[in-house]
Image (spheres, grey):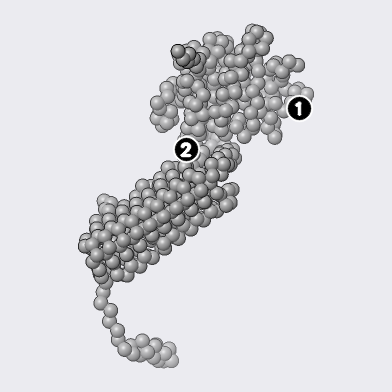
Amino acid sequence: MINSQVPAPSTAVLLAAGLGTRMRSALPKAMQPLAGQPMLSHLIVSAAEVFSRVVVVIGPGMDDVAALAAPHATVIQHDRLGTAHAALQAESFFGEGDVAVLYADNPLITPETLSRLLATRRAGTGAERTDLALLAMRPVDPARYGRVITAPDGTVGKIVEWADATEAERDVDLCNAGVLCAEAGHFREWLHRVGNANAKGEYYLTDVVAIARDEGAIVRAVEAPESELRGINSRPELAEAEAIVQARLRQNAMLAGVTLTAPETVFFSFDTLLEPDVVVQPNVVFGPGVTVRSGAEIRAFSHLEGCEVGPRALVGPYARLRPGSSLGEASHVGNFVELKATTLGAGAKANHLTYLGDSSIGAGSNVGAGTITCNYDGVFKHRTTIGENTFIGSDSILVAPVTIGDGALIAAGSVITHDVAPDALAVARGTQVNKPGWAARFRAALRAKKEQS
């Protein structure tokens, strides 16, 4: 008989009630974007990988944050009275097991670090136990971070805010990141004992450390890199965090078998999926929802969003793939070509200066330079369907809705407004008229006019 152990319950409380004041933004701080998704989403993903329950504390009127948090529970902090007060709003969700309190403006914490935090809290017995675990870092510039003062045995003796620290304490480089983890019953008790006798009259979560120590609790710090634990409170800090996230995404892509010829110039979204043996040239931007299959090459200065690139396909340089587009195996989308809600079959090509919107292009077809599909009549969008092995001559205009059959040929410069049967030739342009000697006479007339003036 297999003896399976059910993991002990655990709850992550994410504090996301902050406004975007220092961001100078109408968006709540938790909704500021990182790699194409809100900061809070990054933290939810990491927390949900480690904790059995996630609860998000939001402010009043933050319906967009509540929608983002779903299906996880949300509670409202109606009065912003500090971080300890915010954590207490989620008290009814603490349940049994352990509770960790995290911050939406610390979205870079990895699941590995959260796992170490939880494991530290649960490890050991007696004098080796940990009643309260916290995250700490050693930043390059400790600046005004609160200092974590440790005892000779390595446990945390206290946290001292920079303003209250002595010169010796300010020399300590271990800094508090604000994240705490404790057994639910203890955490609940300590939170209720936090007071607001301070300049702002707020209830601070960091006061839990002193309260726990006064009760004889053992407090230990779990160190993590500054790149994970730094807070994001302003636009410059958001840009710095974006750089950290992009560096992680590039590293993960290359370790997974992707070639980035100039990694620092490529920008990913949180969900970009690149299979092994994909090559990405410099200055490529991936918006949300992009999948690139093995062997494809994305050439320089291309922008992709909400699309799928098939195996061995070529994209760019200077191509734009918009949402709803899909490229078949070994298809080509060349320079200054834009696709929107368009599928290219296997081996199909649109190599230059072309717009294809709301279109289906069959396998093996070739779309000549300067071709556009007129998909919008000012009210509705209409589709263009091009069959397999067709040839669309350069500078053709395809006025949707229109269907071009397999093997058809569209003469260059045509304006196609009606369906074209399979294997037919369609020519839709004005009749050419040649007038012998007219150009010479025109130039002579111009010269005569100049001489008279």
Name the residue nearer the viewer: 1 or 427.
1
Relative to 140, does residue 445 appear above or below in the rendering? Answer: below
The total number of labels drawn is: 2
Relative to 116, does residue 252 appear above or below in the rendering? Answer: below
Q: Is residue 201 visible?
A: no
Q: Name the residue: 67% across, 26% down.
A: 175
Label 1 Cα neighbours within 10 Å, binned few <14 / some 14-19 / many ≥20: few
Residue 161 horizontal/vertical position (percent): 68, 23
Mark earlier in primary sequence (1, 2): 2
Relative to 254, does residue 140 appear above or below in the rendering? Answer: above
Q: Quarter of the image containing the N terminus?
A: top left
Q: Quarter of the image containing the C terminus?
A: bottom left
Q: Is residue 44 visible?
A: yes
Q: Secondary structure at mark 2?
A: strand
Residue 262 horizontal/vertical position (percent): 58, 51
In this picture, residue 275 sits left or right of residue 177: left
Name the residue nearer the viewer: 324 or 449.
324
In this picture, residue 111 sits left or right of residue 2: right
Residue position for label 2? 37
Q: Secondary structure at mark 1?
A: loop
Residue 171 image label: 1
Q: Name the residue: 47% across, 50% down.
A: 295
Looking at the picture, which amino acid does disc 1 mark? Asp
Looking at the picture, which amino acid does disc 2 mark? Gln
Residue 284 horizontal/vertical position (percent): 51, 51
Residue 114 horizontal/vertical position (percent): 56, 25
Tell me which corner region of the image, top left, top right, bottom left or bottom right, holds residue 206.
top right
Tell me which corner region of the image, top left, top right, bottom left or bottom right, holds residue 252.
top right
Name the residue nearer the viewer: 319 or 172.
319
- Using the numbered discs, state the Cα–Cα distance from disc 1 to disc 2 in whole angstroms: 38 Å
Q: Name the residue: 66% across, 12% down.
A: 128
